[in-house]
Image (cartoon, helix red, strand yellow):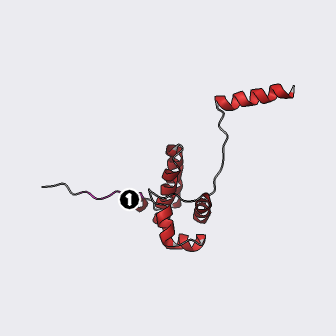
Amino acid sequence: MALKTTRWDSARHLATEEDRAAYLDACMEEAGGDAGFIAHALGVVARSRSMSQLARDTGLTREGLYKALSEDGNPSFSTVLKVVDALGYRFSLVREPRASYKATETRAARKRR
């Protein structure tokens, strides 16, 4: 007898806003520089709520949102910002010290002397 499986859908397991926030936090940590991964994560959260309501809140079409926030989607930054805002989130930038940044700061300090 063959084993029957079903496709995993994270959206079905994001029942609360806390679940959704934790999911997005984890995806941001894991994504590295993969913008498509982040867009897909936003799509998962959107599907866990209501894509129709998100379409109304963003002024974008439901079909356009499904396409942009799919695994193969490539949304504009403007679309990402609209989705993030409509979902009730915001981006926050945190500066991470890196060796290349420190070298640039050291050169800039020497020039000022």
Q: Where does the image place residue 1, in percent across and percent down from the top left?
A: 12, 55
Task: Give the residue at x 45% y 57%.
Answer: 72
SS assignment at label 1 = loop
Task: Give the residue at x 50% y 49%.
Answer: 27
Q: What residue is shown with label 1?
A: 9
Question: Is 9 included in the stretch rendered in magenta?
Answer: yes
Q: Is residue 50 left or right of residue 103?
A: left
Task: Give the residue at x 51% y 66%.
Answer: 65
Q: Is residue 89 left or right of residue 109?
A: left
For the C terminus, the image quarter is: top right
As rendered, which of 40 and 24 lies closer to the eye?
Answer: 40
Based on the displayed image, in which of its 4 quarters is residue 59 positioned?
bottom right
Determine the residue located farthest toward the right in the rendered image. 113
**Looking at the picture, which amino acid does disc 1 mark?**
Asp
Q: Where does the image place residue 69, in percent across and percent down from the top left?
A: 49, 61
Magenta stretch, residue numbers:
5-10
